[in-house]
Amino acid sequence: MTLLVWVPLLMPFLAVPAARRVAAALAPRHAARLLTAVALTLAASSSAALALLVVPGASYLPVVAVLGDLAEPLTAGPPLVAVALALGAGGLLLWRTALVAVAVVRERAALRRARAAVAGTRDELAVLRDALPDAYALPGRPGRIVVTTGMLRALEPAEREALFAHERAHLRGRHHLLLVLAELAARCHPALRALRDPLAYALERAADEAAATAVGDRRLAARAIGRAALATKAPLPTRPGAVLAATAGPVPRRVAALLDPAAAARPTLPRAGRLVAGVLLASLVVSGATAIGAADDLHAHIEVAQGETTADAAR
């Protein structure tokens, strides 16, 4: 088990670069789903691997041996090594859990403050009287498009409609959930942090394409996003970190994609891209399979130790 359990901990360093390359060749909507699925799969596998490292070392504790009916520890290696690995893995698990809990609490508090700021608005569009130009999609029940008077003054009427269509696409697609899941996964393994920026970009590009379709003019959508980004000097203090906005990310790259007619076509993976996709799929399968295999191996060791206990009791 000790050898198998390291595979899910090391696999993200191979899978994450492959996921970024494959996502770059996919349509934005599919890229966002792929990156989120990869982040969650690798976070779950690596967390399970850490938990499996804790058990053998913990079996040296008398209380664990009694509760598990164990006649002997669950490792044949040096006790100091098993205990040291258990302490290290347990510390990392506690640290990860604390980071995820703190992130959840902070984001929930930020969302509550943002919703309180527009509590008096019942329409989909919530206009804040603020000279600072800003606009974003605020999730909730119902979700709202928050825009300041400064942003409304910075755009022409047709550009406003394109901007609203962009933010509406974020709400309709529940893009904030994908972003939050990826943010939480990034706190479970350091390699997964590299998926956050490409995921945010894919979500913005997906909303860009939805806005261009809604207004029927890619150039208008590109102009609206460009002008909104130029007008935005800084986000509102009440804007939560988990929300998405048309002015976020590499705006020049997004505008260039909207002005490129080929970007609207359904992309296909080149041969090299298909090879990388195969590497990515193999990495995910191996990561999950080795975690399950390590768990089965540990379970077999537990049954052997418990069987010896039962045999001792019968004698």
Image (spheres, rainbow, N blue to C red):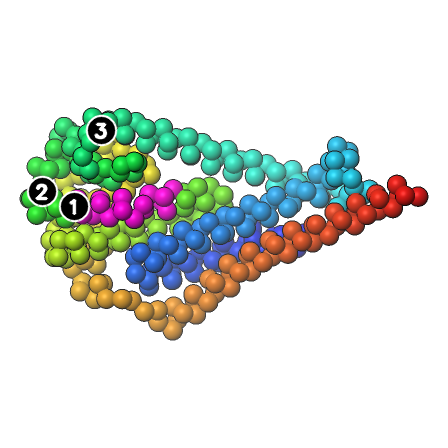
Per the image, label 3 sits on a secondary structure element best described as loop
Residue pictured at 67% horizontal, 53% vertical: 296
Which one is in front in this view, the residue at disc 2 or the one at disc 3? 3
Q: Residue type at mark 1: give it.
A: Leu
Task: Give the position of the C terminus as an image quadrant.
Answer: top right
The residue beneath circle 1 is: 163
Q: Amino acid at mark 2?
A: Leu
- Residue at 70% from the left image edge and 50% from the top image edge: 299
- Judged from this view, the residue extending furthest toward the left is 156
Is residue 286 visible from the viewing direction of this image?
Answer: yes
Tell me which secondary structure the magenta stretch mostly adopts. helix
Question: Which of the pair 307/51 is nearer the observer?
Answer: 307
Span highlighted in magenta in the image: 164-180
- Identify the residue shown where x is 56% and y is 35%: 94
Query: Total number of numbered labels?
Result: 3
Q: Which residue is mark 2?
A: 155
Q: Is residue 177 magenta?
A: yes
Res. 4 visible in picture: no
Q: Secondary structure at mark 2?
A: loop
